[in-house]
Amino acid sequence: MRYRWAVLAAGTAAQASSAATFAIGLPVLAPALREEYALSLHEIGIVLAAAWVGSMVTLLPWGLAADRFGERVVLVSGLAGCAAFLAATAYARDVVSLVALLALAGAAGSSVNSASGRAVMHWFGPDERGLALGIRQTAIPLGGLVAALCVPPLAGAGGSELAFLFLAGLCAAGALVAALVFRESEVVDGVEAATVLATLRDARLWRLCLGSSIFIYAQVAVIGFGVLFLHDEHGFSENRAALFLVGAQVLAVVLRVGAGRWSDVVGSRVGPLRLVGLVVAGSLLATGVLTDGPVWLLLVVLALAGGLSMGWNGLAFAAAAELAGARRSGAAIGFQQTVLSGYGVAAPVLFAATVSATSWTVAFLLAAVFPLAGWLSLRPLREH
């Protein structure tokens, strides 16, 4: 059974390669893209939303494909396609091409979510899944850490072209690792429509997905726009502004593993998930209050808010998979991630519009309402 840890490591590496691009790479590149393509803040929001649009369309089909054909073929083919589209993005001539290629990259790269999550569900028992999925979800901050450290100097040396080629190489490496390590687990012989529909009609799954995915707004506000905020409002260079992301990613790694293990011990995913949401709301309020405060304190609070806003994903992921059961976990994860992507499409556009219409202070304060709403909506599921 030691092989399960190899699966976890390979799945984490594959997820990290995708996360380096979409979770952190694009936000870090935002100032460079704005300059190269002469973008407004509103248009930057559309660029950041592009990958979410692509993934929203394909996440459920990828989940069904993982149930039907297995994790290996889904993960490898999706990440390889993502690498190809990112390489093409490096040479996008206009903003329309940029958005279209990012959407295609997001559509292909979203395969990693259901495939690696399903593999963990298969190889780990219920008493270890929270910890295992927490470790697997550290891929996002770990990939983000790589992006925060590497993308700014690459963009400074060769613009977005060199940065996108680097990110494409990461995804290609993730596909290679998965191809070498993964072997297929149990697959479903045919996808029975009635079973899939029953899963998607589960009211608890809908409540879980809608209530937890709204937390993404806080993550987008801090992680997606933090570099631009520090650059525009406090005169930080891209390299210096990206350093707050390093602290946020380190904290997010600790929180995801700790929250996953905590949920194993208490026997509940939703209880810890709700508490994390409440703390995230508080961190956004503090960020809004300090937007014009002492810069050193603002950086500390911004890093804390960033780390906290990334600490909930593994809990929601595990809860969705367990509601559906191991055989249909790919479909459930795909559905959960589809709902998450729907929020992800709207969040950067809405946050950018709020900043343009009001101020950074108001935008961060309003962002605190979203995790608070999630905390309230998940209350009926708190015993799960």
Image (cartoon, grey):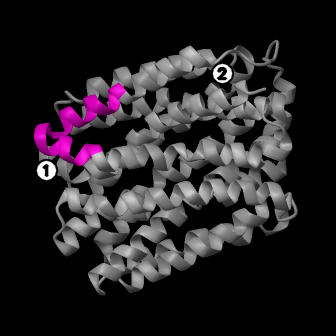
Residue 135: image location, x then y, percent: 62, 45
Dots 2, 1 in contact, CB < 8 A: no
The 10 Å Cα crowd at callout 1, few under 14, some 14 to 19, many 20 or more, is few
Q: Residue at horizontal 61%, vertical 41%?
A: 136
Q: Amino acid at mark 1?
A: Glu
27 shown above or below 143: below
In magenta, the rendered stretch is 150-169
In the image, taking residue 288 as reference, residue 327 lies left or right, namely right
50 shown above or below 236: above
In the image, taking residue 22 as reference, residue 184 lies left or right, namely right
Badge nearest the viewer, 2 or 1: 2
**Disc on res. 35:** 1
Magenta region includes residue 237:
no
Magenta region includes residue 153:
yes
197 shown above or below 349: above
**Disc on res. 71:** 2
Q: Amino acid at mark 2?
A: Glu
Q: Nearer the viewer, residue 237 or 363?
A: 237
Dominant secondary-structure state across the stretch colored magenta = helix
Is residue 377 shown to the viewer in this render? yes
